[in-house]
Image (cartoon, grey):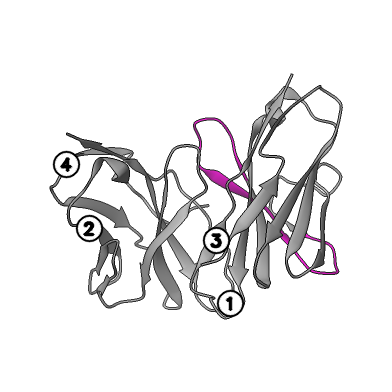
């Protein structure tokens, strides 16, 4: 079973920041938080991952709470092309740990 | 990044027949997985494809229904056997690239419709 909880859907205005929350209260010490997204009719795409520190890359920022029980994915300037289902997943790093998907959040970016 | 391709991209099949889906990766892969995505649903892991040995299946999936081969580090096949309309789904191949354990790549999927 998936170990994360996400809201089923969210809306965001184009050009604004999209903040997608995720709860993972049972995360283990050796599990990382991963975010993927799936644009309609495509395979999932990796976005970002982190253990306990905040992370940023060219696509997004990941904010993980100090107790690691929740996190937020931030898309700083959402565009219409960011409309997708976003999946938050906990995974054991460096063992090729398999990704177990939950239901994700369907983000709609509106003009 | 790695490129994962799947063949066929889509197919329409008759009940009771079987379909083999091919997955090719342009880099060596340490781990390889097969997922199913039923209409309107999230991805469900079917199995881990092990090179040179039997695949490791998740609960609810069996080898007789979904035989998997992985003859080398860059190629795998998934067969959907004795199909029924309930097998209509998108089937996705996924891999963890050697030296890139932090990221799991996905193929574009094979859209299967069973009549």
Residue visible at 53% across and 76% down? B100
Label 2 neighbourhood size at 10 Å, few (<14), some (14-19), many (20+)? some
CA gap between label 1 and label 2 equals: 27 Å
Q: Which residue is mark 3?
A: B105
**In x, y percent, where is residue A50?**
35, 72
Q: Which residue is mark 4?
A: A14
Q: Which residue occupies the foreground of this view, B65 or B52?
A: B52
Contact between labelled residues 3 and 1, with CB atoms less than 8 Å apart: no
Q: Extreme top residue here?
A: B115
Residue visible at 86% across and 45% down? B64
Where are the magenta residues, as a range?
Answer: B36-55
Q: Which residue is mark 2?
A: A74
Taking B39 as reference, is B62 left or right? right
Is label 1 on the same chain as label 3? no
CA gap between label 4 and label 3 equals: 28 Å
Residue B53 in the magenta stretch? The answer is yes
Who comes first in sequence, dot 1 or dot 2? 2
């Amino acid at each position: 079973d998936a170990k994360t909880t996400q809201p089923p859907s969210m809306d965001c205005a184009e050009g604004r920041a999209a903040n997608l929350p995720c709860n993972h209260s049972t995360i283990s010490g050796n599990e990382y938080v991963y975010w993927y997204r799936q644009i309609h009719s495509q395979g999932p795409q990796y976005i970002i991952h982190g253990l306990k520190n905040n992370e940023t890359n060219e696509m997004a920022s990941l904010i993980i709470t100090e107790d690691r029980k929740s996190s937020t994915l931030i898309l700083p300037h959402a565009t219409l092309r960011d409309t997708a289902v976003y999946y938050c997943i906990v995974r054991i790093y460096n063992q090729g740990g398999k990704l177990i998907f939950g239901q994700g959040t369907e983000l709609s970016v509106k003009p | 990044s790695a490129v994962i391709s799947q063949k066929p991209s889509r197919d329409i099949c008759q009940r009771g027949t079987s379909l083999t889906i091919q997955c090719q990766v342009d880099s060596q892969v340490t781990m390889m997985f097969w997922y199913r995505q039923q209409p309107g649903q999230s991805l469900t892991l079917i199995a881990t494809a092990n090179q040179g040995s039997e695949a490791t299946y998740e609960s609810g999936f069996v080898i007789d229904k979904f035989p998997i081969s992985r003859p080398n580090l860059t190629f795998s096949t998934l067969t959907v056997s004795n199909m029924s309309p309930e097998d209509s789904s998108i089937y996705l191949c996924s891999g963890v690239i050697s030296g890139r354990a932090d990221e799991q790549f996905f193929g574009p999927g094979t859209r299967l419709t069973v009549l």
